[in-house]
Image: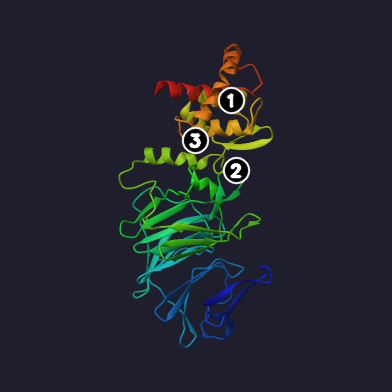
Amino acid sequence: MYLIGGWIDKGLYQSNVIYILDLDSLEWEKKPSIGQYPGPCNMHTAEVYENQIFVFRGGDGQQYLNDLHSLDIDTFKWIEVQTKNTKPQPRANHSSCLIKDEMYIFGGWDGFKRLNDLHKLNLRSLEWLKIDVKNDILPLPRAGMKILHIEDNIYMFGGSGNVNNGQNQLICYNDFWIFSIKDNYWNQCKIQIKGLNTNSQQSIQPRSGHSFNFFNDQIYVFGGSNGNNYFDSYIIFDVNPKPQLIANDNMDFDNFFLQNISSFYNQPQFSDIIILVQNQQFYAHKIILSSFSENLKMMFTVGMAETKVNQIQISDITPHVFSILLQGIYNRNLSLQKKIWKILIYFLMFIKLVISFWLKRLSFKFNNIQPKLLILIIIWIFQKKLNR
């Protein structure tokens, strides 16, 4: 196993040293090299092709780079590889994989923004090509994700990106994608955990900077981090049979959108309103709430107090019950379990009491916003249930 470069001394310096681990004796060896070595590098990638290791930088602690070097593992001589066509823009914390004679580069961070572009380099002709993806449904721009190849597909998991909420907030992802190199097409995969009937993806901790390896029909994910939370756990994805896809060639955008709304439940990504229930925060999205109810749309658009605030508070309900109601919207699951409907029935008398209150105050002259969102959510769910 070869180890090339990386952060050292708590991230203060970048290394250009090569270490080799003998997997039989488990002994490390520091290996000298000659030639045009790439210099200090971090957040780079390396792929083995024939008797060479190709290193695509990456950063050196001062700038972001897009140079390519190869190391001959017989002579330990470095050369700087001169490629043809337009290179990928400089970046770090990208991911790469090798498929036959081609090295693929995805995503990363260029110092200003995260990326979701895909490039490939033919290692025989040394020609770069930016891949023209055939569909509009792409993984969000990210860095720190990992990719690998299985047969003629690229599998990707995790990474981190920015939330467009004006606060430049950084979050990690737990989504799983497949790219078909034959069709130049991205598809998101549905994740199902054995023995778990709820939304499985929500139970997988988002992360970036993890390991991602394939062995014996299974992908192994280990470690990674989410903010200051570092993981020592592992996840195993069984990819035989091939994972169920959320989107495919026969699915239009509307169906894709509806099936993926659930992934935004209580997620800060793109959230523009926070709902407080007994001091517990629920992240929500006005556009999703409004798209399912004209009453909610009116509340957010016609000058009520909620129109101008990004945080509201609801009382007289527990966080657990409210989470069930909110999931009813995001999952579009109107066939809720019987126990959930029992909980909702308890609110019928409450609704009866507050409807008159709602109608009287429809003049928009009130500021008490605590019960309104709860009432509208419950009314919407019951209306949908009764109209089926």
Q: Is residue 311 above or below residue 111?
A: above
In three-dimensional space, the C-alpha distance between marks 2 and 1, rounded to whole angstroms, equals 27 Å
Q: Which mark is residue 166?
A: 2
Q: Nearer the viewer, mark 3 or mark 2?
A: 3
The amino acid on which the numbered mark 1 sits, given as a three-letter code, is: Leu
Q: Which mark is residue 374?
A: 1
User: Where 229 sits versus 305, above or below?
Assistant: below
Camera-near label (2 vs 1) is 1
Residue at 47% over, 88% down? 75
Query: Taking 372 as reference, is 67 above or below it?
Result: below
Q: Element type at marker 1?
A: helix
First-in-chain label (3 vs 2): 2
For the point 60% across and 48% down, the residue is: 168
Q: Which amino acid type corresponds to the residue marked 2 in the rendered image?
A: Gly
Specify few, some or many for label 1: CA neighbours under 10 Å numbering under 14, 14-19, or 20 or more: many
How far apart are the two marked residues, 3 and 1, measured between alpha carbons? 15 Å
Q: Nearer the viewer, residue 278 or 197?
A: 197
The residue indicated by pointer 3 is: 330
Q: Position of residue 250 (x, y in %)?
A: 30, 44
Q: Does residue 4 sit above or below 319 in this rendering?
A: below
Under circle 2, the secondary element is loop
